[in-house]
Amino acid sequence: MKTIKDLDRKTFKEQFQTRELCLSYLSAQKWSKGYYCLKCSNTQFISGKQIFSRRCVKCCYDESATANTLFHKLKFNIEVAFEMVYDIVLSKKGANSMWLAERHSISQNTAWLFRHKVQIAMQSSQLFPLENEVHIDEFEIGTPKEGQQGRCFTTDKIRVVLAVEYRDGKCGRGYAKVIKDYSSDSLRPIFDEHITKNAEILADGWRGYSPLKIEYPNLSQTLSEKGRNFPMIHNQIRNFKNWLRGVHSYCTSKYMTKYIDEYFYRFNRRNHRKSMVFNLLNRIRPL
């Protein structure tokens, strides 16, 4: 694992080595702007039954420091969960549930369930859409079969559309979505959710993009030439497939969206690795 200045494993473990330190951190982050009762909106509280919990003086609702965070209703020690977040986010290619289970002496099912919660928290906020020059393409995940080429219809493969920014000859941010087919209706959501209307969008010659030019006037198309005209995005497609095969080996269509969220959460913060961990630790929302 790469050592990160001011956030190597030793520093992180020392900061969150006990249950009390973890709960103290969550409490400070959760109520950093003041207390607000989730049940009655009252702003007055007293200490709750559990350490660092707060009880509303009006309706007596007792809210723990872990409520509505990644660590709500944990089945194992919270300090172990903090370190698991560190492993999932900052290990070179991520961490699968079997590796996490062996490393932290918990069952694989428990590791998988917690990892699943972390992946949910990795969903895009959709607050930072792609802009300027954007390249977009689709690909399939699954074993090629004889006689099936291009955008063929089969239920054995998972279809994904990927969009990335092109900045000064380098790759910027990126997003991807699972799609049902290659129609414009299936391709439209990634445009609406992740690309600005005035972006300079480049796609291949597939006819499914043509109807989108009405809402995205700067969308242009060119022949792919087997990827030669889209080297950057095809490199990102290979990187994603290699990561999926190398770390997780196998993934069904049911969970593919969560693996996409994990990959691009890490990818879009690759130059801000320290914030990757604390962004997840600080997220307060129902999970």
Image (cartoon, grey):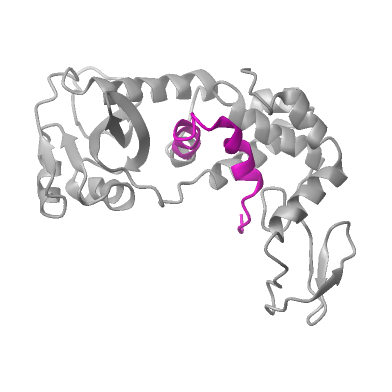
| Residue drawn at x 49%, y 26% as measured from the top left | 250
- Residue reaching furthest bottom? 58
Q: Nearer the viewer, residue 237 or 35?
A: 35
Instruction: From the top left corner, tell me how far across and down residue 246 is, in percent.
Output: 50, 18
Would you say 212 lies left or right of 111 here?
left
The percent position of residue 272, horizontal first and vertical second, equals: 53, 33
* Left or right of 38 on screen, residue 194: left
Q: Which picture quadrant has residue 157?
A: top left
Does any portion of residue 159 appear in the rendered image? yes
Q: Nearer the viewer, residue 50 or 277?
A: 277
In magenta segment, residue 150: no
Compare residues 117 and 20 and report the one nearer the observer: 20
* Part of the protein shown in magenta: 260-287
Residue 243 vs 46, above or below: the answer is above
Front residue of 154/266: it is: 266
Q: From the top left corner, tell me how far across and down residue 108 is, in percent.
A: 69, 31
Prevailing secondary structure of the magenta residues: helix
284 inside magenta stretch = yes
Residue shown at 70% from the left, 53% from the top: 29
Q: Quadrant of the C terminus?
A: bottom right
Residue plotted at (69% across, 28% down): 6
